[in-house]
Image (cartoon, grey):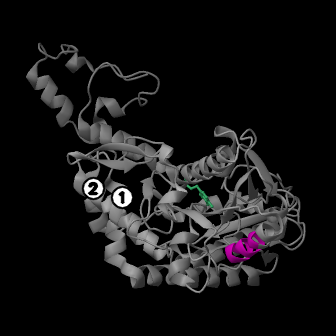
């Protein structure tokens, strides 16, 4: 319930025209936390009948949001949580612009296209200046567009050959992110999942190729598994699909989901061949808001060549008296994230991105070794691909990684524990994503806290694990 007006304000009405001006002034002059709006519960289920002063509304909301905890202690998210003040200023200045209005904001559209061409060049597209691509709200939308282009391309070829187009399928590892499970359901494509086996926590190229047939629209390779941070071997997958083509004639394209890795590998592992250097790679997506170092949400998808994107997926919008091709599932969104992406690209350059990602990797490797040296843990990944690593318990104990995740929250740390996907659901891991702004000093504090909780578990032989939890999602 919203608090009732106080007696001294009883003359006020909705329109306020007969309110006593003195009462009104007194109401808004009161010290902040003595104001009537903050003396009761916040409006919850109905729009309040009357206004409240902006500063009061600000404090009411600001104070509630303190409960969210600090995003900097969130070691679960891949998303950017720190940006330079100049970038934030530019974002603030451009929140009011709608990215989709290319005609009204042609310079914003120009910055978007510059980012597309820069990423195409970074990913070794054959003709980066004319590559087709777009910004999106994140990798999920980018993956939808990448998957749709694969479906359209497959369907067109089948139609031309007079073959059935009823049963498209897509091959992917069980470790792909939820957006690919959405893709198959939303766009009616059969999902063919390559399960994980044994100690392998990424997709086996041979087993992926074995699942392909004439109805396969493509194979998804993940550069930087969400579960462990490991890169999949895109070159090996491409070579395996080359051999499949030699044997069967099937020409299966690859989409690389580089949500995190497409913004890391070009700077930290330039020798790894995963991008448009492989002719079979037809499209790549990334999240600008992950290792592109922008606050959420911005993503990118780029096609190798214009012919890899069916013209039906492109809409033409008015642009400076002419038309401009656009492709997107979403429509309106703020321009600020795209502007901030362009800021990062030109402010940091290749050496700046390399320096930041190298710093993250140094912290990740340092932290991984510290955690391993505590005793009960074994690393499942090392932090040497993405600055992300995961560990498991060496032996079953009277406490679980879920319990440790719960206890770590006492000082604000969010370090998720979760089950690996099929067929390794028996394996429970805990993961840390090291991002720009996470220092060695903070890492050492985390290790100290983990040790403190292990001492607590050791002193509580009667403690019984609540096991699965399933509270954290990746
Ligand atoms: C490999 C992978 N693909 C796609 C996504 C979805 O990205 P977004 O949150 O930008 O939509 C994620 C998010 O973690 C991811 O790790």
At which x and y percent is residue 135?
Answer: 42, 55
Tell me the residue that label 1 is attached to. 338
Q: Which of marks 2 and 1 is in front?
A: 2
How many angstroms separate mark 2 from mark 1 (CA)? Answer: 8 Å
Q: Residue drawn 41% across and 81% down?
A: 350
Residue 203 showing in the rendered view: no
Q: Are marks 2 and 1 in contact (CB under 8 Å)?
A: yes
Quadrant assignment for the N terminus: top left
- Determine the image quadrant of residue 452: bottom right
- The residue carrying pointer 2 sits among few (fewer than 14), some (14 to 19) or many (20 or more) residues within 10 Å by Cα, namely many
Q: Residue drawn 67% across and 55% down?
A: 177
- Determine the image quadrant of residue 258: bottom right
Boundaries of the magenta span = 233-242
At which x and y percent is residue 336?
Answer: 32, 55
Mark carried by residue 171: none
Q: Position of 461 compared to 106: left or right?
A: right
Quadrant assignment for the C terminus: bottom right
At which x and y percent is residue 186?
Answer: 64, 39
Question: Does 76 lie within the magenta span?
Answer: no
Mark carried by residue 108: 2
Question: Does 238 lie within the magenta span?
Answer: yes
């Amino acid at each position: 319930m919203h608090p009732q007006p106080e007696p001294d304000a009883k003359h006020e009405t909705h329109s306020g025209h007969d309110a006593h001006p003195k009462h009104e002034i007194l109401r808004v002059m009161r010290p902040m936390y003595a104001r009537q709006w903050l003396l009761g519960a916040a409006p919850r289920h109905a729009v309040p009948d009357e206004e409240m002063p902006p500063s009061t509304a600000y404090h009411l909301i600001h104070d509630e949001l303190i409960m969210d905890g600090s995003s900097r202690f969130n070691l679960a998210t891949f998303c950017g949580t720190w940006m330079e003040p100049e970038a934030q200023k530019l974002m603030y200045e451009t929140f009011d612009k709608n990215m989709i209005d290319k005609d009204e904001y042609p310079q914003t559209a120009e910055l978007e296209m510059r980012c597309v061409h820069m990423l195409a060049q970074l990913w070794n597209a054959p003709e980066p200046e004319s590559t087709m691509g777009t910004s999106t709200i994140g990798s999920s939308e980018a993956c939808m567009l990448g998957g749709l282009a694969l479906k359209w391309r497959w369907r067109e070829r089948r139609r031309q050959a007079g073959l059935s187009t009823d049963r498209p399928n897509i091959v992917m590892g069980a470790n792909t992110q939820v957006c690919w499970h959405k893709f198959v359901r939303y766009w009616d494509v059969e999902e063919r999942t390559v399960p994980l086996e044994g100690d392998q926590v990424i997709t086996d190229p041979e087993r992926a190729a074995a699942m392909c047939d004439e109805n396969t629209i493509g194979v998804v390779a993940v550069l930087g598994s969400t579960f462990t941070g490991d890169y999949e071997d895109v070159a090996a997958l491409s070579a395996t699909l080359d051999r499949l083509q030699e044997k069967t004639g099937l020409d299966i394209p690859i989409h690389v989901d580089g949500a995190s890795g497409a913004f890391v590998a070009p700077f930290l592992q330039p020798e790894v061949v995963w991008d448009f250097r492989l002719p079979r790679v037809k499209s790549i997506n990334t999240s600008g808001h992950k290792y592109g170092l922008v606050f959420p949400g911005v993503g990118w998808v780029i096609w190798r060549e214009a012919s890899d994107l069916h013209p039906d997926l492109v809409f033409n919008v008015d642009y400076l008296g002419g038309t401009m091709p656009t492709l997107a599932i979403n429509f309106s969104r703020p321009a600020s994230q795209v502007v901030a992406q362009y800021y990062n690209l030109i402010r940091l350059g290749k050496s700046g991105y390399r320096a930041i990602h190298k710093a993250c990797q140094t912290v990740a490797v340092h932290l991984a070794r510290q955690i391993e040296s505590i005793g009960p843990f074994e690393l499942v990944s090392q932090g040497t691909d993405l600055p992300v690593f995961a560990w498991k318990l060496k032996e079953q104990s009277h406490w679980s990684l879920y319990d440790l995740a719960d206890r770590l929250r006492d000082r604000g740390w969010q370090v998720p524990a979760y089950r690996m996907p099929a067929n390794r659901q028996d394996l429970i891991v805990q993961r840390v994503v090291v991002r720009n702004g996470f220092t060695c000093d903070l890492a050492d504090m985390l290790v100290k806290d983990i040790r403190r909780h292990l001492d607590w578990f050791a002193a509580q032989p009667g403690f019984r694990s609540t096991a699965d939890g399933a509270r954290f999602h990746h």
